Image (tube, helix red, strand yellow):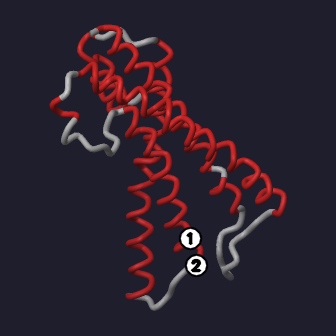
Amino acid sequence: MPKLISDAVASDLKNDGIAVPLFTRIIERIITFIAVSAHVGWLLLIVVILTNVVLRYVFSNSSVAMEEVQWHLYAYSFMVGVSYCLVQDQHVRVDVLAEHWPSRRRAWIDLLAMVLLVMPFAYIIANGSIPFVEFSHKLSETSRSPGGLPYRWILKSVIPFAFGLLFLAAITRALRMIAVIRAK
């Protein structure tokens, strides 16, 4: 595992001396490792956007395929990055009230949010998107634009993959919150 990943996971796994289950640590490391591809996706997205701008405005040429690569990279990086944010406790939430609460109360709220909101949502989207991907694969769906990308099902398969990762991230977050509750 690259040094960057191991340092980020190791610092998060300390969690103030709270014993975190091995399963949780393994899944968090897997999600963090996969998230590196999302980070690389952002860098590639910048390169593709700059290339498109130069092609369009300097050479008066544009490519539909390159424009579609842009939104494919954006979709992949964003969807996979959500699970990483959850694992690293960097997800969006309102901390105005919670920052003044004891850690046990915050842990209970996080646990309930994971179990009642995030996990059902991620499961429904992941499970519901599988037929969508299968149908696209059976049709050998391609871009409707001339010069667009083939194999549209590959991009669509990111949906169940990313929401499956989000489901796993929510499980690990819930297990981590249970450890916090038991420790306090």
Badge 2: few (under 14), some or many (20 or more) residues near its Cα, within 10 Å? some
Give residue 85's position: percent from left, percent from top.
Answer: 38, 40
Residue 68 coordinates in the image, percent (x, y): 56, 70
Q: Is 3 on the left-hand or right-hand side of 133? A: left
The quadrant in which the N terminus is found is top left
Q: Quadrant of the C terminus?
A: top left
- Which of the pair 63/122 is nearer the observer? 122
Label 2: state its secondary structure: helix
Q: CA distance from mark 1 to mark 2?
A: 6 Å
Task: Identify the residue position indicated by label 2 in the image.
Answer: 64
Pick the front one: 42 or 1: 42
Above or below for 141 versus 16: below
Three-letter residue code for mark 2 = Val
| Residue 89 placement: quadrant | top left
Q: How many marks?
A: 2
Which residue is found at the position 41% from the left and 26% from the top?
111
The x, y position of residue 65, in whole percent, is 59, 73
As drawn, the residue found furthest toward the left would be: 100
The residue type indicated by label 1 comes to Glu
Residue 172 lies, with reference to residue 32, above or below; the image says: above
Q: Is residue 96 left or right of residue 144?
A: left
**Which residue does the image show at 68% across and 42% down from the upper left?**
127
User: Which residue position is annotated with label 1?
Assistant: 68
Residue 151, given in percent of the width and then of the height, sits at 72, 62
Task: For mark 1, give the secondary structure.
Answer: helix
**Which residue corresponds to the image point at 34% horizontal and 33% vertical from the top-left?**
88
Q: In the rendered image of this protein, does residue 137 appear above or below residue 120?
A: below
- Against 129, residue 67 (above or below) is below
Q: Quick check: marks 1 and 2 in contact, CB under 8 Å?
A: yes
